[in-house]
Amino acid sequence: MRFIGMAVGAAVLALSPAGAHRIRPLGHVYPGGGYTGDVFVHRGFAYLSSWHGRNCPSQGVRVYDLSRPSRPRHVSTFADGSDLAVRGTWTEKTIVQHAATTSFTGELAAVSFQNCPGTNAFRGFGVYDVTNPGSPRQLSLVRTDPGGSHEIWLQTVRRRAYVYTAIPLAEFPGHPPSPGFRIFDVTDPRHPAEIGSWIAPAAMRRNTPGVFVHSVRVNTAATRAYLSYWNLGTVMLDISSPTRPRLLGRTTDPQGSAHSTAITPNGRVLIETHETNGGRPSFWDISKPRRPRLLSVFKPPARLIANARRRGAAGFTLGVHDAKIIGKRAYFSWYALGVIVADISNPRHPKFVAQFLPRPTPDPENEFCAKQSCTYTWGVYPTRKYVAAADMVGGLWVFRPPG
């Protein structure tokens, strides 16, 4: 597979009226061969995951050195079809953290695995040693039935490490219900052990269609878990004792389709995204998790929506996907709108700052673009020096934070 890196100009805000608040790209690489999943940046390296498409080429996780952000350099690929144990899978999410446990010291990566459509391939998650990003090493694979790990979180705390995983099919109709949220102790990453789980009580699920855990995020102290429980909203759990998760409260946004979350550094405000037709991020005061309060719903400028519609975007492609927070800025991966940057210094009144719109790219399988080029931004990861964005059809983009 060829990897093409290219510099695409300095990252500045274009100040002409037609392009005001539009961010120019700094660097780009197109991995080819299929669709891109999420992106995670750790210690100067971008971990680019992959999505299945119809052909499901098992691309695994591509690692790029961003020491020169204008020229991302491919240094390795892991968790891909070259490993027979995970052939026939797709790897949507990768989380990387430094770990200093009783059994391991270095950089750990947790990778979600789902089986390609129509196959009985491996499903679950993998733990990898990426201390040398150019030579990742598999430490363990954990199978999670029935549907594998959709979205995942890895958190290290003191001398321990945990993987938290969302398994949507565990609670889908047609399957015997089992916990869609599970906790694994990976303090010894070669021998992970399931130690806790949680499923919404029947009374909470009653009369609410579309109830399953889509994704999970955990605070740095590993005391709170935020489960994006689709039409149940965001469910907040006390996981101070990981063997006995305890319900604290949940949000109740009428938009439904709670997809993922981001938490402000002080832990008091939660951003909830909604993967639905025209979904918008909602801001919640969770200082009292038993009674979360809706603070605001952020709407991008109408002209950005109108421009996307003129490019052929419709339905949930006009909705928000993921959110990341750094300082007083929120970065939203917004499918057809690219990346939207907002000032959240006052979460009751978030303000639009800028847009990064990746160049349209031909769709390799015509899953999203109907035989034309398009932008379909899946994930974003901001740092102080640069921001990485993953476009499903266009690959990895890098730009400077605005301002």
Image (cartoon, helix red, strand yellow):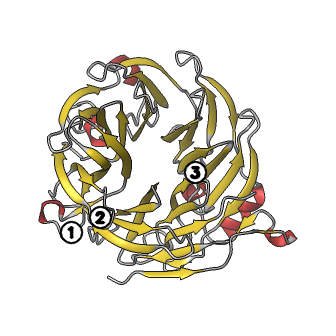
Q: Which mark is residue 320?
A: 3
The part of the image, by quadrant, that contains residue 287 is: top right
What residue type is disc 1 on? Gly
At a point 74% along the width and 41% down the height, the residue shown is 350
The answer to whether mark 2 and mark 1 are in CB contact below 8 A is yes
Look at the numbered disc 2 and give the secondary structure of its residue. loop
Mark 2–mark 1 distance (CA, rounded to whole Å): 7 Å
10 Å neighbourhood of mark 3: few (<14), some, or many (≥20)? many
What residue type is disc 2 on? Gly
- Labels 3, 2: front one: 2
239 vs 348: above or below: above
- Judge left or right: residue 14 versus residue 143: right
Mark 3–mark 2 distance (CA, rounded to whole Å): 25 Å
Q: Which mark is residue 60?
A: 2
At a point 30% along the width and 35% down the height, the residue shown is 162
105 vs 286: above or below: below
State the quadrant of the C terminus: bottom right
N-term mark: 3 or 1: 1
Q: Which residue is mark 1?
A: 81
